[in-house]
């Protein structure tokens, strides 16, 4: 069971002991990401994530940071999202204090060296180039741009080549001061520690007690407005067209977020789902096709992604639209609904076998929602979703005016795709 401890400066420490493992994961989560950025410094959250591994006074280089963890077989990395940034190290139980020492050092004492900054700009620009050359992933960036436009929710998490090139050391330090503070930070410890839970909390407090207790900046509200179906087309000479087709949906605090997740699984979350059976197995239009549900604190959507032959894109989009329409017209059979529920619960149970998954599962709930449900509590809410709920939610989400299509392929005629956006 987890235990949440809040220190006087506002820092939260979340401990989740596990007996049947020899590993322990320390994860630092900060409640900030690309949705908190200004246009001129778009990408700064992701840039900072990179920079924290470049050296501290105690460990003056990237090598000095990585080598101690490599020496004990540790797994460590960082990640940036729209609303959070995370840094973690997973090690054998006996190396727990080393993990805390390294993570707290980079978090509190990074030098943010000017020369390292300039080198890392080149690394990130190459990362941006890589995504742009990979349409299967870049179409997801276009999807966000289509839904939210020129505001933080619609920008690439990595920023642009232009904004990254212009970010200064002063920008980084100012951003850290405004966001990397105790009330906006969560230290998660999951797995087998060599100490009691009480001592583990004390150790974490000792390593992180220098974090500033000042307040932090909130993110701007996301503006959502759509009165008709919309399409974003990027011309690229590809052998396969990559598309994202779906609709706006529910945020994390919406009462129907679990129904939305189940709806996505029914449509395209399994190899026996409706769209996989229709688009791949029956029509042979795609090698990969899947439907997912995404919910942030203030935005959400349900979206199907696929890669199809350039000559069959219109047929594929129409077939997906037909399945969207069908699920708004007739109730999902009880057996199909139960299969989707058990699929979600089964995947979650399998995921939560490792300490790093526990840290993320509990930590992200706390940092985003400021509350935590156990897997059993989530399963109970999933089980409560009925056939009527799925029908009601499908009809609400798949209103024609909510439909959106982002597409990368050798096309210039937006109008021919726009006319397909109807159900």
Image: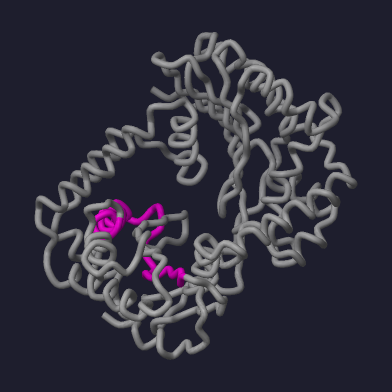
Side (left or right) of 365 relative to 281 = right
Q: Residue furthest left?
A: 334
Whether residue 419 is situated above or below residue 343 in the rendered picture = below
Q: Residue at x 48, y 14 (%)?
A: 22
Q: Residue at x 56, y 79 (%)?
A: 235
Whether residue 9 is situated above or below residue 200 in the rendered picture = below
Residue 423, image x and y in percent? 26, 80
- Answer yes or no: is residue 332 visible: yes
> What is the span of residues highlighted in magenta in the rendered image?
240-268
Frontmost residue, 72 versus 329: 72
Frontmost residue, 266 versus 70: 70
Whether residue 228 is situated above or below residue 197 in the rendered picture = below
Whether residue 232 is situated above or below residue 164 in the rendered picture = below
- Answer yes or no: is residue 37 visible: no
Q: Say if the magenta span includes residue 244.
A: yes
Occupied quadrant, residue 205: top right
Residue 242, image x and y in percent? 46, 69
The image shows a total of numbered marks equal to: 0
Side (left or right) of 286 relative to 127 = left
Frontmost residue, 365 versus 265: 265
Q: Residue at x 50, y 83 (%)?
A: 411
């Amino acid at each position: 069971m987890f235990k949440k401890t809040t220190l006087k400066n506002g820092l939260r420490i979340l401990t989740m002991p596990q007996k049947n493992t020899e590993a322990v994961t320390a994860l630092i989560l900060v409640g900030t990401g690309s949705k908190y950025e200004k246009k001129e410094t778009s990408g700064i959250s992701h840039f900072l994530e990179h920079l924290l591994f470049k050296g501290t006074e105690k460990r003056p280089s990237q090598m000095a940071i990585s080598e101690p963890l490599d020496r004990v077989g540790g797994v460590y990395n960082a990640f940036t999202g729209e609303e959070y940034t995370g840094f973690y190290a997973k090690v054998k139980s006996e190396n727990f204090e080393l993990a805390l020492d390294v993570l707290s050092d980079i978090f509190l004492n990074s030098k943010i060296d000017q020369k390292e900054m300039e080198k890392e700009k080149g690394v990130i620009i190459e990362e941006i180039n890589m995504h742009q050359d990979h349409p299967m992933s870049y179409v997801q960036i276009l999807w966000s741009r289509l839904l939210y436009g020129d505001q933080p929710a619609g920008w690439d998490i990595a920023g642009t080549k232009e904004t990254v090139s212009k970010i200064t050391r002063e920008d980084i330090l100012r951003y850290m001061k405004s966001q990397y503070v105790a009330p906006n930070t969560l230290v998660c410890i999951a797995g087998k520690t060599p100490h009691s839970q009480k001592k583990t909390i004390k150790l974490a407090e000792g390593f992180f007690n220098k974090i500033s207790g000042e307040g932090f900046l909130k993110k701007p509200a996301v503006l959502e407005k759509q009165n008709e179906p919309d399409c974003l087309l990027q011309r690229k000479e590809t052998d396969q067209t990559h598309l994202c087709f779906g609709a706006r949906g529910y945020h994390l605090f919406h009462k129907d977020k679990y129904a939305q997740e189940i709806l996505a699984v029914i449509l395209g979350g399994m190899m026996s789902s409706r769209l996989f059976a229709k688009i791949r197995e029956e029509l042979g239009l795609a090698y990969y096709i899947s439907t997912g549900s995404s919910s942030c604190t203030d935005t959400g959507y349900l979206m199907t992604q696929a890669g199809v032959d350039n000559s069959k894109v219109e047929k594929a989009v129409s077939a997906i639209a037909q399945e969207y329409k069908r699920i708004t017209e007739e109730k999902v059979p009880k057996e199909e609904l139960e299969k989707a529920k058990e699929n979600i619960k089964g995947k979650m149970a399998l995921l939560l076998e490792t300490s790093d998954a526990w840290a993320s599962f509990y930590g992200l709930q706390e940092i985003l929602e400021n509350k935590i449900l156990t897997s059993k509590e989530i399963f109970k809410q999933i089980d409560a979703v009925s056939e009527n709920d799925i029908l009601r939610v499908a009809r609400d989400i798949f209103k024609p005016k909510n439909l959106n299509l982002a597409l990368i392929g050798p096309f210039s005629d937006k109008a021919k795709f726009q006319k397909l956006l109807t159900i």
